[in-house]
Image: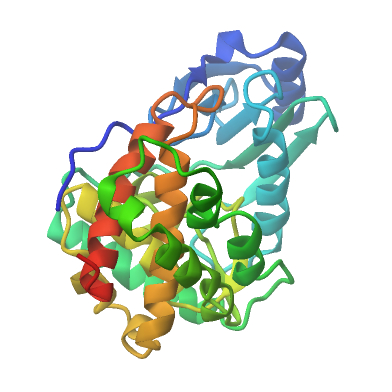
């Protein structure tokens, strides 16, 4: 089932390539010149993604993007700023320190506390996966009930994660044979996911290795623009295909290690998995978005795992 994935990486700007007005704004907030800027290689954020050090020794993590790099990213950054600023202080999330927002049509800058950590190794190492799974269980428990009001996971499934229904209306020739055979049934199953994912837990909704940072004593979860409220088992469900894709255990085995997933209704999990598989399958067939040249191949690899897992759970050959 393991598929060798492409890197999770957008097109990042160097500090020197950031518009001068934004560099001035950042240095004005810091109160000192930036003397070191280390571009971070991973993640699907286009634009500046860098650890900065100022002349007075202060270190921060900064990301910045404008609509000319990717038209959707500024709104995602605004959503992330709203979510992270409202998370409880004990949440394992780098604190948001400062936001610079030029408004519609302009750039947005987010500055976070600098975490001296690294993403999990690929292929997954057992001890690192154990740490991440323990952290995700603790995170779901601490964020139930959700400490902030947000849209429900069901709303996101109904409006953003309806890949089989979109494919059903278009039936592209490049769709794989299993999906083509079962497309109508897959679309019907996907529709039931809207109610299946209901719950009261604040979900990250995009857990992957590149959205996790490991330090010697902590696991941090980063990049929260997709956060919503739903069943606690939804985050490990979304996580499982990427883990298998990157050399980790079978998705069913991974789900069995999350208490909320163990107690979840099996039909609800299958319905939500159908939505996940449809999302990745549909997205993988679209043109690459600006600044994210490896995203579609990354989604295609997750889709292959999710479809195989879904075939096992449904028995659809």
Taking depth in this image into account, of 283 and 222 the one nearest to the observer is 283
Residue 216 visible from this viewpoint: no
* Residue visible at 41% across and 48% down in the picture: 280
Taking depth in this image into account, of 97 and 178 the one nearest to the observer is 178
Q: Position of residue 135 (x, y in %)?
A: 37, 68
* Residue visible at 45% across and 23% down in the picture: 39
In the figure, is residue 124 to the left or right of 288?
left
* Residue visible at 54% across and 56% down in the picture: 165
Relative to 135, does residue 227 appear above or below in the rendering? Answer: above
Which quadrant of the view contains residue 6? Answer: top left
In the figure, is residue 49 to the left or right of 310?
right
Which quadrant of the view contains residue 9? Answer: top left
Taking depth in this image into account, of 270 and 151 the one nearest to the observer is 270
Relative to 188, does residue 28 appear above or below in the rendering? Answer: above
| Colouring | rainbow
Q: Position of residue 106 (x, y in %)?
A: 80, 25
Residue closest to the far right: 103
Which quadrant of the view contains residue 78? Answer: top right
Q: Position of residue 312 (x, y in %)?
A: 21, 70
Relative to 23, does residue 8 appear above or below in the rendering? Answer: below
Where does the C terminus fall, quadrant-wise?
bottom left
């Amino acid at each position: 089932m393991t598929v060798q994935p492409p890197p999770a990486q957008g097109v990042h700007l160097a500090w020197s390539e950031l518009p001068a007005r934004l560099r001035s704004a950042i240095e004005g907030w810091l109160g000192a010149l930036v003397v070191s800027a280390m571009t971070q290689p991973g993640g699907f954020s286009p634009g500046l993604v860098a650890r900065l050090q100022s002349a007075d020794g202060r270190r921060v993590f900064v990301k910045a993007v404008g609509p000319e790099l990717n038209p959707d990213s500024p709104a995602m950054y605004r959503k992330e700023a709203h979510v992270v600023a409202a998370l409880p202080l004990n949440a394992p999330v780098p604190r948001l320190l400062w936001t610079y927002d030029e408004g519609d049509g302009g750039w947005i800058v987010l500055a976070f506390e600098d975490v001296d950590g690294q993403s999990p190794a690929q292929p997954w190492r057992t001890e690192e996966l154990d740490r991440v799974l323990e952290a995700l269980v603790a995170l779901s428990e601490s964020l139930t009930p959700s400490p902030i009001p947000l849209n429900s996971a069901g709303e996101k499934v109904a409006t953003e994660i309806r890949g089989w229904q979109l494919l059903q209306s278009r039936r592209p020739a490049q769709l794989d044979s299993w999906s083509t055979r079962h497309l109508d049934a897959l679309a019907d199953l996907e529709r039931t996911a809207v109610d299946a994912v209901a719950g009261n837990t604040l979900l990250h909704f995009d857990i992957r290795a590149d959205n996790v940072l490991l330090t010697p004593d902590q696991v941090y979860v980063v990049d929260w623009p997709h956060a919503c409220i739903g069943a606690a088992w939804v985050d490990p469900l979304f996580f499982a295909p990427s883990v298998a894709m990157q050399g980790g255990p079978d998705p069913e085995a991974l789900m069995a290690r999350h208490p909320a997933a163990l107690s979840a209704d099996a039909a609800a999990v299958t319905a939500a998995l159908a939505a996940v598989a449809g999302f990745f399958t549909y997205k993988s067939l679209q043109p690459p978005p600006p600044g994210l040249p490896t995203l579609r191949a990354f989604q295609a690899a997750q889709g292959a795992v999710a479809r195989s897992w879904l075939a096992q759970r449904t028995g659809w050959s």
